Image: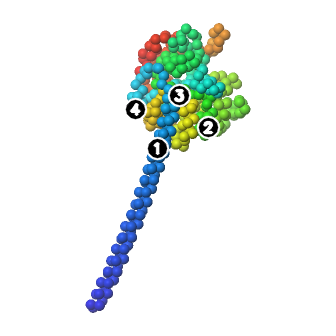
């Protein structure tokens, strides 16, 4: 009996020893697994910080190059608007001489007033006729003038003031795009997918109506430049410009492009804006949802010949329609549209903009 008890104790001891070794081995495996999980998390964190610092550096350098404030007194507190994610407006202007090497000079080939409303997840783009008959702010003695000459007379300051008065809509920011460098911008986002609005050939490229095509930079430039063979004339070209610019913006907001130094370098060469680095960071943070839905429109004018010069006269009811659309997109009250004949004191048509 004593011998059996001793054998039983020895068996229990061996089992206990095995259990202890098994427990120690299990703890060791858990420690190893925990170590590798922790190591992986640290690697991911470092990788994330690396990419964040890379994006931050690229964005900061590009913004410093693009930043070009003008002398327009803001009609609204834009800092508060951006911080609170409230609707904002940006006047997009495309200069028409960049292809000749004279960047950001001359008349504006493109004038688009853009609004972003993140709460409604909506953006609105309204093209303005380049040949619209206006009196340019501080240059009224040249009346009648074409709207696209405002930038030529006084840069972004004069262009913003003139459009702001013309429509009685507050313009919070501006961005000037070198349309001659449009092809480089398209290439920087690895091309754009566009469905042509009509069939035509221009600049060595052919386009088929409603047939989706992936456009390279030169192809996109040819697509937006054709005007004389379009039945809608400049209005048809405006529509094509809005198509391509919208696609550039959509592609440019992708993670791949945000991590691309090439993208930031190219964009910084082709843009001038009064949006600061902090402004752009707030846009990226709070306004991404505004691109989910889009309204694309234009102000329709009627041809008018004055002293042998062709103008587009936009009827008052059409201007009012555009003003209502834009003010509604900004969540501000309705108001009368601006005056075609403008005063030079910068107060006549902007009292009701807030």
Mark 3 burial class by Cα count in 10 Å: few <14, some 14-19, many 20+: many
Q: Which numbered circle lies on residue 133?
A: none
Secondary structure beneath label 3: strand
Mark 1 burial class by Cα count in 10 Å: few <14, some 14-19, many 20+: some
Secondary structure beneath label 4: helix
For the rendered model, the colour scheme is: rainbow
Q: Label 1, label 4: how many angstroms apart (C-alpha)? A: 21 Å
The spot of residue 230 in percent (x, y) is: 68, 25
Q: Which numbered circle lies on residue 52?
A: 1
The spot of residue 286 in percent (x, y) is: 44, 35
Query: Marks 2 and 1: which is nearer the front?
Result: 1
Mark 2 burial class by Cα count in 10 Å: few <14, some 14-19, many 20+: some
Q: Which residue is mark 3?
A: 272
- Specify whether 263 is left or right of 89: right
The spot of residue 280 in percent (x, y) is: 47, 33
Whichever of labels 1 and 3 marks the residue nearer the N terminus, that label is 1
Q: Label 2, label 1: how many angstroms apart (C-alpha)? A: 24 Å
């Amino acid at each position: 009996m004593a011998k059996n008890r001793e054998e039983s104790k020895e068996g229990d001891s061996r089992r206990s020893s095995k259990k202890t070794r098994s427990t120690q081995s299990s703890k060791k495996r858990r420690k190893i697994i925990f170590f590798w999980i922790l190591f992986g998390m640290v690697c991911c964190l470092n990788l994330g910080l690396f990419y964040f610092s890379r994006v931050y550096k690229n964005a900061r350098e590009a913004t410093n190059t693009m930043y070009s404030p003008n002398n327009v007194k803001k009609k609204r507190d834009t800092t508060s608007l951006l911080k609170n994610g409230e609707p904002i407006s940006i006047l997009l202007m495309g200069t028409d001489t960049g292809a000749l090497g004279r960047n950001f000079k001359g008349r504006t080939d493109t004038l688009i007033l853009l609004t972003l409303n993140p709460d409604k997840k909506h953006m609105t783009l309204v093209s303005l006729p380049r040949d619209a008959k206006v009196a340019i702010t501080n240059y009224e003695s040249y009346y009648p003038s074409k709207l696209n000459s405002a930038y030529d007379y006084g840069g972004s300051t004069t262009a913003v003031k003139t459009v702001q008065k013309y429509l009685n809509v507050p313009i919070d920011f501006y961005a000037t795009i070198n349309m001659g460098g449009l092809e480089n911008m398209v290439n920087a986002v690895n091309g754009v997918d566009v469905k042509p609005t009509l069939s035509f050939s221009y600049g060595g490229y052919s386009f088929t109506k409603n047939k989706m095509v992936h456009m390279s930079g030169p192809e996109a430039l040819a697509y937006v430049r054709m005007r004389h063979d379009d039945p809608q004339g400049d209005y048809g070209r405006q529509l094509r410009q809005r198509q391509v610019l919208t696609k550039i913006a959509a592609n440019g907001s992708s993670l791949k492009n945000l991590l691309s130094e090439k993208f930031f370098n190219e964009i910084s060469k082709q843009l001038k804006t009064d949006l600061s680095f902090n402004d752009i960071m707030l846009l990226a943070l709070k306004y991404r949802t505004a691109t989910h839905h889009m309204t694309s429109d234009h102000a329709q004018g009627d041809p008018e010949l004055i002293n042998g010069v062709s103008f587009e006269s936009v009827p008052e009811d059409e201007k009012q329609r555009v003003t209502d659309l834009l003010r509604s997109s900004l969540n501000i009250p309705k108001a009368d549209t601006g005056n075609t004949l403008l005063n030079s004191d910068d107060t006549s048509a902007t009292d009701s903009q807030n």
